[in-house]
Image (cartoon, rainbow, N blue to C red):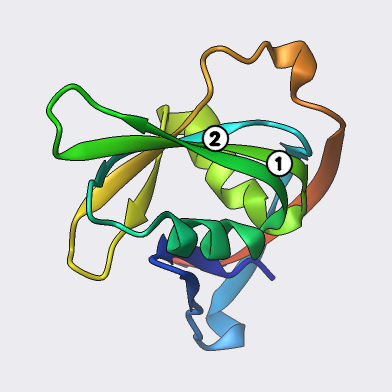
Amino acid sequence: MKTAGKIVDNELDNVAAESSAENNKTITFERKYYTKMNLVVNNLPSEYDIDKLCKTFEQLGSIIFVSKIPNSDGNTYNAKIVPNEWTLPISAIQQEIFDHGFSEYVLRTGHVCQITRDRNQSFDDYGDAYEYQEEYEVEDNK
C-alpha cells in the first residue's frame, strides 16, 4: 500500500490515511525510479545547514556528494545531490518531478524549496530504471 509523504527538513514525514475497507477499492499504477538521477534543491536559505540536507537524502539512498551553489541574490543557494544509488523511497520525489517539474522540500521554518532534476545530466546517465507498482485505496462512490 502506498503511503503518501513529503520531505520535511531531515526526516520523511509519512502520512497514512485509513478508511473503511468495505467502501474502498484499490487502483494500481506502474511506476519506475532511476538509481543515478541527480537532484537539485533550489533556493535554500544561506543559513541552512547543508548537513541536514545530506542526512535527509541519505534516507533515500547512498550519496556520493552534495555541492553548494550560491545564488546571485546572496541570500540563498542551490544544492546539487549526486547519488551513488537511490533506493525505492526516492520514487515519490522523482515521480513528482516527472509529473510537475518539481517536488517540494519544506523546512521546519515553513520555507518551501523546490527539488528539480539536474538539467546538465542527460537522461542516459540516470542509471538503471527499476519498475514497481503503487497501490492506492480510493473510496468507491456507489
Image coordinates for residue 72, horizontal then vertical, percent: 18, 22
In the rendered image, the quadrant that contains the N terminus is: bottom right
Quadrant of residue 135 within the rendered picture: bottom right
**Residue 83, label in figure:** 1
Give x and y (percent) for residue 37.
68, 31
Assess disc 2: are there few (<14), some (14-19) or many (≥20) residues with their C-alpha within 10 Å of its C-alpha. Answer: many
**Residue 1 got which mark?**
none
Q: Image point 82% across, 28% down: which residue?
A: 127
- Between 46 and 26, the one lying in front of the other is 46
Please tell me whether residue 137 is drawn above or below residue 29 in the rendered image: below
Residue 27 visible from this viewpoint: no
- Amino acid on which the number 2 mark rests in the picture: Leu
Residue drawn at x 49%, y 33% as measured from the top left: 97
Q: Residue at x 24, y 27 (%)?
A: 71
Whether 120 is drawn above or below 92: the answer is above
Q: Amino acid at mark 1?
A: Pro
Report how far apart the C-alphas of labels 2 and 1 lie in the structure. Answer: 9 Å
Residue of label 2? 39
Residue 49 lies, in percent from the top left, at 36, 59
- The structure residue drawn at horizontal position 75% and vertical position 33%, both measured from the top left corner, is 36
Task: Describe residue 90's horizontal placement relative to residue 88 as left or right.
Answer: left
Q: Position of residue 84 (x, y in %)?
A: 79, 42
